[in-house]
Structures are given as C-alpha cells and as structure tokens.
Image (cartoon, coloured by chain):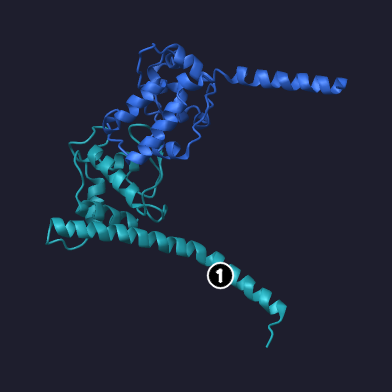
C-alpha cells in the first residue's frame, strides 16, 4: 500500500527531530565511552603496578585534588592553585594568567576524552604540582572524581 | 578613465597605504596556524612569531623540556610542524607590523627568549607596580589581560 506523501513528510520530520534530540545525547555517550576507555587503560596499568589494585576512588581523587603537595613549583602547591577549590568553576593558570575551562565533567563533557591530551596534561601538571609523575592509581582516582563533579 | 574613477582609485590607494602605516605600531600578523594556536595556547596566549627572530624560535622549540621552568614537551610531529610555522613567520622573516620595531632591538647574533625583555616592550610598559599587581595580570606575558584583542594581533593601548 502506498504511503501518502503527507504521512511520509511527517515521518521524516519526526525522524529529523528525533535525530536532533538524540545527537547531543549520543555525543555525551561517546564522551563517556572515551572516558571509560581511558579509565580502563589506567586500571590495567594500576593492576600491573599493584596486584592488590581494587579500583578507583572519587574520594581519593578529591584528596589528590585538594592536597597541598610539596616538591612541585611553589606557585602551584595544589591542583586548586589553578583550578580553584570548585572544579565546576573557571580556573586560571597561576603562572601565566591564562583562563582554564572547568575540569568538572558535568560542565565540560569533553574532559578526559582524548588519551593524548590526558597523558600530556598529567605529565605536565603532576610534575608542576607534586614534583613527580602521578601513578596510574592517582590519575584514575582524579578522573573518577572529576567525572562525578 | 572618468574623473570619478580616478578619484576613487586615489582614495583607495590612500586607504591601502594609510591602513598598515597607521596600524604598524600596535599590530602584528596574528597566528594563523591551528595547531600552533592550540598547543602554544594551551597554557598561555600563543604569542605571534613576529616578536622573535627565527633563531629564537629554534631555541624555544629545542628547549621545551624546560620551558621557563615547565615541561612543555609535545609529540615530535606536532613540534616539527609548530617549529616550521614559527620560524617561517618569525620577525626577521616577515618584517611586518610591530615585528619591525621589535627586530630593531635584537642584536645580529642575539637569541632572545623573552618578548617582555625587548626594549620595544619595556618602552610601552613602564607602569607603576600596582598595574602589574592586578589579580588578572599574574605575569607580564599575559597580554590579553589588558590587550583584549591581543590574540588577533592588535595591541591597542588600554
């Protein structure tokens, strides 16, 4: 039976609207999957370093974020020196004054989705704040905390 | 050629010559390379390559492991691309806008790394300490704190 053309255009309009509504959701789903993949790789690394590894902890990530470390650059004793105490707020690079987009995933869904970016940022920032490289456990804890913020 | 056409041509040529001449002391060709903009602009404003000679950019890219105290290393293919862009558009290569003024102060064998130490910069930034101490400034290299169009190459007086 031929479908009336009016019905067809209504159908395609509905389909179009459905796509428009679904698109942002699927972009978020992609971002979440990319973040999950990064966490999975870190978990594997953490397990290799410590067979007793029992998963990542948002609470430990928050402690990492708020702790004033010693050994890094004196201008950046803690993550909060640039990112502020509130991960959902805009930050400012304490050395250059450059504004920094919020780290919290809720306000910045693209955070922790590009493995190269994540590796680069941890390499730079852990050296500047902790004065050493972060462990896979610490990186995973941090991302887990920020994913809930 | 009609009289109108002649006067239009004259007016246009006046515009063309007056434009860059007027802007020369507060404009420099902006960064047009997306990767340079993204990577250099990650931690600070991506400074226009015209502020330093090519040999300075070579030294800068050679020293990313200790970039003013920070580890700014990036993947080798990205670094190569950025090095090529910065050196091709360096002040001693383009000689346009403010690059001319900044290059005047660089010795033939000089390899400056800090744009903020060029006398051309210092002459324009002879402020009392309270200006530098404004919370949004943080450091002298934070151009956009005062020059809101700095990233587009415009350094109009604030």
Q: Residue at x 20, y 43 (%)?
A: A133
Q: Quadrant of residue A120?
A: top left
Q: Residue at x 31, y 60 (%)?
A: A37
Residue B95, x across and y down, in percent: 51, 19
Work out which residue is located at the far bottom of the displayed protein and give it. Answer: A1
Residue A138, x across and y down, in percent: 21, 51
Q: Residue at x 23, y 32 (%)?
A: A74
**Chain identifier of the residue bearing label 1 in the image:** A
> Is residue A148 among the parts visible in the rendering?
no
Secondary element at tag 1: helix
- Mark 1, Cα crowd under 10 Å, few <14 / some 14-19 / many 20+, is few
Q: Residue at x 49, y 61 (%)?
A: A24
Residue A146, x across and y down, in percent: 32, 54
Chain A: give its colour: cyan
Residue B129, x across and y down, in percent: 38, 18
In the image, A19: left or right of A53?
right
Depth order, front residue of B131/B126: B126
In the image, B45: left or right of B72?
right
In the image, B56: left or right of B50?
left
Q: Quadrant of residue B79?
A: top left
Chain B: give its colour: blue
Q: How many marks?
A: 1
In the image, A129: left or right of A113?
left
| Residue bearing mark 1 | A18
Depth order, front residue of B5/A88: B5
> Is residue A81 among the parts visible in the rendering?
yes
């Amino acid at each position: 039976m031929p479908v009336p053309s009016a019905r067809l255009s209504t159908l395609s309009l509905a389909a179009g609207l459905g796509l428009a509504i679904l698109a942002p959701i699927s972009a978020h789903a992609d971002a979440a999957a990319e973040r999950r993949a990064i966490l999975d790789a870190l978990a594997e690394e953490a397990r290799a370093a410590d067979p007793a590894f029992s998963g990542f902890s948002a609470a430990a990530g928050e402690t990492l974020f708020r702790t004033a470390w010693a050994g890094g650059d004196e201008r950046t004793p803690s993550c909060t020196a640039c990112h502020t105490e509130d991960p959902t707020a805009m930050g400012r690079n304490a050395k250059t004054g450059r504004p920094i987009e919020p780290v919290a995933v809720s306000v910045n869904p693209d955070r922790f989705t590009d493995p190269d970016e994540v590796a680069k940022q941890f390499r730079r920032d852990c050296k500047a704040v902790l004065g050493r490289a972060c462990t896979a456990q610490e990186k995973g804890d941090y991302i887990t905390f920020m994913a809930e913020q | 050629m009609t009289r109108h056409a002649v006067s239009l041509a004259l007016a246009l040529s006046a515009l063309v010559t007056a434009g860059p001449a007027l802007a020369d002391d507060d404009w420099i060709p902006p960064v047009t390379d997306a990767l340079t903009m993204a990577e250099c602009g990650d931690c600070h404003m991506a400074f226009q390559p015209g502020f330093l000679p090519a040999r300075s950019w070579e030294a800068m890219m050679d020293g990313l492991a200790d970039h003013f105290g920070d580890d700014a290393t990036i993947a080798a293919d990205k670094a190569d691309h950025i090095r090529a862009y910065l050196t091709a558009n360096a002040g001693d290569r383009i000689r346009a806008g403010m690059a001319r003024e900044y290059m005047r102060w660089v010795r033939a064998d000089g390899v400056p790394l800090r744009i903020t130490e060029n006398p051309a910069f210092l002459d324009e930034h002879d402020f009392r300490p309270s200006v530098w101490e404004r919370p949004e400034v943080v450091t002298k290299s934070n151009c956009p704190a005062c020059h809101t169009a700095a990233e587009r190459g415009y350094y109009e007086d604030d």
